Image (spheres, coloured by chain):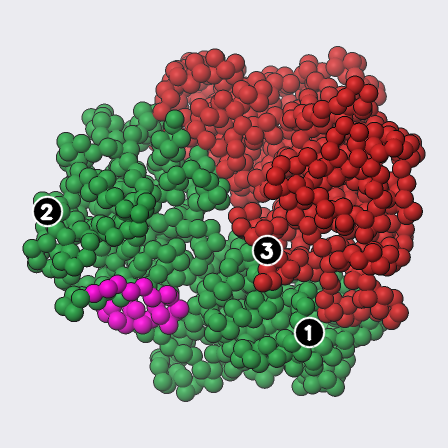
Chain colours: A red, B green
Amino acid sequence: MRTGIATVCLSGTLKEKMQACAIAGFDGIEIFEQDLVTSPLSPEDVRKMAADLGLGLDLYQPFRDFDGVTPDLLKANLRRAEAKFGLMSRLGMDTILVCSNVATATIDDDGLRASQLAQLAGLAGDHGIKVAYEALAWGKHVNDYEHAYRLVEMVDHPNLGTCLDSFHILSRDWDTAPIEQINADKIFFVQVADAPKLSMDVLSWSRHYRVFPGEGQFELAKFMGHVVRAGYTGPVSLEVFNDVFRQSDVERTAVDAMRSLIWLEEQSAKWLAATDAEGAGGAALRRRYPMELATLPKVNEPAGFNFAEVKADDTAQLEKLLGQLGFAFQGRHRTKDVQLWTMGQARVIINEQAALHTEPAIAALGFDVDSPVIASARAQQLKAPVVARKVQADEEVFQGIAAPDSTEIFLCQGSPDGTAAWTREFGEGLEHPSSGASAVIDHVNLAQPWQHFDEAVLFYTSALALEPQPFAEVPSPSGLVRSQVMQTSDGAVRLVLNLAPVQQAQSEVRQTYQEHIAFAVEDLVATAREARRRGLEFLQIPANYYEDLDARFDLEPGFLATLRELNLLYDRDADGEFLHFYTATVGSVFFEMVERRGNYDGYGAPNAPVRHAVQYDSLHRP
Amino acid sequence: MRTGIATVCLSGTLKEKMQACAIAGFDGIEIFEQDLVTSPLSPEDVRKMAADLGLGLDLYQPFRDFDGVTPDLLKANLRRAEAKFGLMSRLGMDTILVCSNVATATIDDDGLRASQLAQLAGLAGDHGIKVAYEALAWGKHVNDYEHAYRLVEMVDHPNLGTCLDSFHILSRDWDTAPIEQINADKIFFVQVADAPKLSMDVLSWSRHYRVFPGEGQFELAKFMGHVVRAGYTGPVSLEVFNDVFRQSDVERTAVDAMRSLIWLEEQSAKWLAATDAEGAGGAALRRRYPMELATLPKVNEPAGFNFAEVKADDTAQLEKLLGQLGFAFQGRHRTKDVQLWTMGQARVIINEQAALHTEPAIAALGFDVDSPVIASARAQQLKAPVVARKVQADEEVFQGIAAPDSTEIFLCQGSPDGTAAWTREFGEGLEHPSSGASAVIDHVNLAQPWQHFDEAVLFYTSALALEPQPFAEVPSPSGLVRSQVMQTSDGAVRLVLNLAPVQQAQSEVRQTYQEHIAFAVEDLVATAREARRRGLEFLQIPANYYEDLDARFDLEPGFLATLRELNLLYDRDADGEFLHFYTATVGSVFFEMVERRGNYDGYGAPNAPVRHAVQYDSLHRP
């Protein structure tokens, strides 16, 4: 698949954008006119720079409001087009995007439109230029890709084809199956963008909220599958207008973009295999369609958390909290300054190697995968940065990659009984470290910088095979917190990505970016009583909460008294019940203990505002 | 008018919110349940604190999903209501908001709804509680205020009335005139919120984008006028869900909120006077309606800019730029370290009193008003912070207030001939300082911090009588810049508020928050030639821009050559033409020279991306 990206997706100058696209490994780019007009680079400079960077200049865009106009305006439009064709020759470019008219179209007549497009195609032909005509979702008269293609067929000129853009097609819910009937020679360009499903006017939606494939909710693999079946072999290029990407680091966004296309390529091949009439996949499928679709190392979703790692300059508070929760200290690593604490199969590493003045924080997460080497190869093909750990000859090698928020992700060898071989490197070399209680890591909640939220969703989707769930918004005293659950289908791995309000990111208040690790136990009340006996500092839940809880759930008085006594939170839905409590925060990390009853599958979201408010209050109290 | 605000409008804890509301001068508040549930304050604490702060506790809210349910659910709902009535007694509160059912309403039958609401009203009556029933815009069966009122009439119980909420009514475009027919005794509460007109689903619009009155596009004065005519005298309370306000400084947001109600009170009285059948205003109007509507000192829109003031630690670069543009140095002030520079009636003060290491920046703007004292009194009643300037006995006293971005705004005595008496305090005491060229301040462009953008719109609307125009979005290499023009009807005063992308606010790149002062001259080409002769450093416009300009406008070759030669920018629309150029930036300020031809009323918006790109490039070039 020939990969491309429009310069409008990225921040910076044209030069910075081109450099970033080359670094990320794109085959070509679309020159968005405004980026050229505002650039000090001459067309010849741009041409040379692209050639030096190995970047194709695949599409010049946009040329607007051409068709369905009066004769006077047509004349002015053809003059304008000729100036752009001349410019394209200097750039060494051969394809221009012409969007269906949104503004000046005064005549709704396919015959007239076809005749005007024919004149444009003729002029383009004189300059060796190909015109890719695209139906904008909000085009005044032409807003459907099949309509645009009918016009292309009517004109039947070698220099006129169509451009298929996933946003313009999927935002309008047009059926994508007829794409397969389009003559591939007439598809001059394909643009892809994903988007969250929003109920708003399509123009605002398009201009601000597009995201890279895998970061939204469009069925892009299906769209691309139809395009591949049509026989198209040209560029597949990202055109994503997004308010955040436009102001984020250009090189990083370009890598995020490239990752999305690599992932889309794989997903498209999967969709094709799954829907192939003869049930063929792999090589057979590749033989069937002319577009080359690269494959990625395959991974299944992780079987569970292998461990969580916290770090600090001074680890005393972390040790104290874990001990009070019921974790057992299993000793130090034989060559590194890290401790292992366990409670059943919940393993927590306390890393003492942190730099001076490092407040306690979540540093790394380990996931059980079928094959760490294959999973790591996949992540690296998806351009995840590798993190390395020093190991001695006889120690287990951890395959590590860095998540967008810098959390280190380790891909570990899972085992049928849930144990981890590397624990032998700790303490006395215990084969199966144990403590009294049974526990597992239930979920981990990571705060995401606002610039990297969408990137994180795609990262965990593509590299770790987690599935994004519908997001929630939780009120807190410092703003709404957006909460995005990523999980495996069986719920064995649950990761919650929290997007804190912008002010928190800008705030100088310590510890506002709180993250946590939640452990599931079988008997939360007993766990809480034990923890209290050991002196644990619980997050203090206000009395008002319990009154409201009673008004909502009509709880048995003894049970309510227990909840109140132990600072436990409670939720109930049709599937089951949820009990949980939080510890106080140390540095930027705190812990949660949960008990899931029945098939409760949530996270106690109705209780999140209480948690945020109490944490805020404890930070701001003089 | 009794002023109120819902605690959900503000950031922080319940305690912080209550304090801020009292400081801002609200008469009462609505307790949003979640703020109480998450608070460590007991109901009794809240009651005492409100009493001590002089704040009424006017409404407890929300009570959701009550009506149109099955018998089982009704029983649970009545139990839930009774718990809340008990809580309200402890709070000393007597009114609760019940919203129309959005979720659990299974039966669409007004008879059933009325009978269930009657049971609720009976129970409320036993506890001395009044139920204000409100139609949510997205209510499942009841989403129209007239429908809600019909149910109230059907039940006809002294403890059941309705709540009118401007958002739920105006977002659905319901006719507001029938409000006048509602029995005022049955209107238990009135909530007001403004909003920008957005095409999106009404729930998202409501939850994220509401703003305070005067910051959006709803016809709130008319809405309130109908409410006043109905004979309502109860609280008028803000209920504004806004993502930005929820994370902004609580005291500041409360003041912004209070300003919006004060302004709305005035606008409502104006609307009543304008639409009164007998043409009565003032005292006659006050006698006619029971609600007391306070009045503000009246101001007309300003007649023009009186001056602009820039400041710096080292003012050499500013002096050089102004001199090169054609400004004449008119001397120093006789008692202060400030210089006066003029070009025609464009007056620029260079303030040399800035603190060490202050980069050149816009510090203050003076506006010509009919009466500085009256205008200042108005601004102060609208809670604008006062800024004072030291003056000697015989010097003109400037009435100053601080704008939300800290720019100092001075309300100056205008004069018929456009001169300013205070210029006599400068240099040799020139009555009419003059320079060769004729010029005026055309517009001033101020960068706004994202937290204070809406506040700034209301500030200039209410205190200075400027009118907000539809906003534009301009692409820049570091993101989209939102641009909001505030101007007088004759265009004599034009202020452009720019909202920079969030990253710019967080960026450490110097000078990204650029602001500018634009001067209008009669012959821009001559002005530019003169400036070039004096050695002015123009903002360098790329050659590509002129090629695009020619493609778009088909310009006369000699004229195009002149534009290119002098780095001039050009725009044209149906009303006229616009020529302009920019200087290089010093500190955070640059200057623009413009020439308006015909009735051109814009700002050369199509050229803004070029300006942003070149400025970005010059900042980021190594």
Near mark 1 (Cα within 10 A), the count class, few <14, some 14-19 or many ≥20, is some
C-alpha span from label 3 to label 1: 23 Å
Residue B410, placed above or below residue A441 = below
- Residue A360: percent from the left, percent from the top? 67, 44
- Chain name for mark 3: A
What residue is pinned by disc 3? A479
Instruction: Tell me which residue sits at (46%, 40%) in the image.
Output: B507
Instruction: Tell me which residue sits at (16%, 59%) in the image.
Output: B335
- Residue B292: percent from the left, percent from the top? 44, 82
Mark whose residue sits in front, 3 or 2: 3
Dots 3 and 1 on the same chain: no
Residues at discs 3 and 2 in contact (Cβ within 8 Å): no
C-alpha span from label 1 to label 2: 70 Å
C-alpha span from label 3 to label 2: 53 Å
> Is residue B372 located in the magenta-colored stretch of the structure?
yes
Mark whose residue sits in front, 3 or 1: 1
Secondary structure state at the residue bearing disc 2: loop
Task: Please state which amino acid type lies under the numbered disc 2.
Answer: Ser
Answer with left or right where residue A570 lies relative to residue A247: right
Task: Please state which amino acid type lies under the numbered disc 3.
Answer: Gly
What residue is pinned by disc 1? B42
Q: Which residues are magenta?
A: B370-391
- Residue B332: percent from the left, percent from the top? 14, 52
What residue is pinned by disc 2? B435
Answer with left or right where residue B568 lies relative to residue B423: right
The tag earlier along the polypeptide, 1 or 2, is 1
Near mark 3 (Cα within 10 A), the count class, few <14, some 14-19 or many ≥20, is many
Residue B419, placed above or below residue A86 = below
